Image: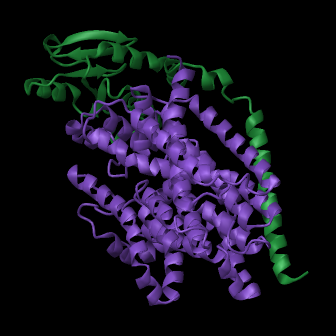
Amino acid sequence: MKPAAALAFAVAAAMAWRAGATLLTEARRLAAPDQPAWAQRLLASTDARITWALGADAAILFSLQAAAPRPALVVVASPTADLATLTPERFEAINRRNGLIVQLQNLAYPDPWLQAVSDPYGVAAGLRAAGRDARVLQLPGDPAPSDAEAWRAQAIADGAVLWSRP
Amino acid sequence: MTALATFALVLGVAVVAPAVFGRGVLLAAVGGGIAPAVAWGHGYLLGQCLLAPVTLLQARLDWPVHGAIAPLLAAALGFALARRAARAVASTGDSGMTWTLVVAIALFVERCLAAAADPIRVSDEAMNWASKAKVLFAGPWAGIGEPLAHFVSHADYPLLDPLVQMQAFAAAGRVLHWENRAPVQAFGAALLLLVGAALAGRARPAVACATLLALLGTRLPGYGCTAYADAMLAACAFAAFDALARARDGAGRGWWPVACVLLAGAVATKQEGLLVAGAVLAPFAAERALAGPRRVVANWRRAAWLAVPALAAFGQARFIGAYGLANDMLDAPGRAGLAARIAAQAGTHGPKVLAHHLDLLLDGAATGWLPLGLFVAAPLAMVLRGRDVFAGVGAHACCACGLALAAYMAVFIGTVHDVVWHLAVAADRTTLHVLPIAALGLAAVAAPRAAVTRGP
């Protein structure tokens, strides 16, 4: 065999191996039981897709969008942690909460625009004083405002409250 | 409107209309005589690159006109242009490749539809790309500064990906959450068409088909069925390479302007698009320069088309400047410049970056051994066949991939982040940007198609 033909044969063999690996991987993927059904891919409404993705948390998104005026800025407490006292459980909880906020932000925008801040009640009060309407989303486990009497509370979903300053 | 009807509307306005427009422009520019896979593949990319500035202008002016009007008018223009131009030839010229392409695209589309079950909600596709499209679409333009700063991650990234998603929003008249992947995913389908057609024209049939399937088995299609911009950049870079090769092969004067528009598309897709565009252009420019300075001077008018990618880079810089945005690698506050960091960190980061990239090249599931094969086969072919190798595209592909990967490695060496983390989250994607060029180069250099020595 000439050297140029040997090179062509070697590359052909390598590519045939990779092509076989591709077809095997694709066949396994198509046969996997976790593939979404065709109805889910083509016919499901966007709300149904969001519900599949977020599970029970989808109720927070839908009720937030229904309750917030348009346009609206809503602030929520960003997850924080002290590295010195961070436990694996606390890390997992922060990770979960951060994931939820990111998903709510991206699926809600622009109505409402949800921003994560370290002091949501202070930010919302400051914006209100400056003449801008801003609400606070209190997620399950978040503290209520210390001056709750100065705020109006609207329960929007299981454990979630939307706070506004009159 | 039902989900299926909205999706069909998005496909019509944001995928089919740009493809019809771009195909017409392409046929008018190059005069026909090309396979349908080439016409539709290049046509889609060209159409999106040419419509994006219109979409941006519409957003900039807060135009009250329905966003579907411009794509549909452009499609009508493309249809008229295509009717006047010569007809495309019947097929890729190889029934084996035609069937391989059918299988590859069917598998890719199936993956795209599976991805559609999940809305865009996490990771870069939500936080970098879809978020920016939503901000630009929701407007008003005068108020986008605040959400760009506080809602969009990496708002400094270029605009082509958000602009093609905006077409999906414009079709429906509202922000969408999964349908807007479709125009981005179509870049992946166009890429498969172009790679298949180029392989059929430049490599022996069996090697061409196997190489296309090998490319399908890399991580590239996985990113191609998301709204990430990486498959878009790979598509624009490959299409520009293919157009440059056709221009060099004398397939028609129109391929050079087409290549410049596609290079602009690469520049407007990701920050590193400028780097990839430069690497794609370099071997062709070097070949032209080596032919003698007289030829370069005689073609200065044609060189003026390079103003198109330059304009894309300028427009991007203006957008960044207007909103006070900064790139974490180029404008890191309080840090030395990128070049200075590369020099300072070469000793500590260099070996880690080199080792990580070597692992990637050896990882068949990630890169299909395509760049590795090219870097081994191209020098061997030069030794065995001499200057003949330069008649094809293998040497050009080897040079473009080598330059791009070397430049990427230099950027990783100069990172402002933890280098191990940065490599883990980004190196595989950057390598994917040149995988299609590596696939074509490998097949063309190792098993060149005997009947065709100057392109399909």
> Which residue in the rendered view is the most extreme toward the front?
B84
B337 w.r.t. A151: above or below: below
Residue at image location 57% in from the left, 22% down from the top:
B4
- In this image, A22 relative to A76: left or right? right
Q: Nearer the viewer, residue B230 or A76?
A: B230
B248 w.r.t. B313: above or below: below
Residue A87 visible in the snapshot: no
Residue B189 visible in the snapshot: yes
- In this image, B199 relative to B317: left or right? right
Q: Which chain is purple?
A: B
* Quadrant of the snapshot with the C terminus of chain B: bottom right
- In this image, B403 relative to B388: left or right? left
Residue at image location 40% in from the left, 47% down from the top:
B52
- Residue B163 lies, in percent from the top left, at 40, 43
- Residue B263 lies, in percent from the top left, at 46, 62
Circle count: 0
Identify the colour of chain A in the image. Answer: green
Residue at image location 21% in from the left, 51% down from the top:
B322
- Residue A150 lies, in percent from the top left, at 13, 13
A67 w.r.t. B181: above or below: above
Q: Nearer the viewer, residue B219 or B144?
A: B144
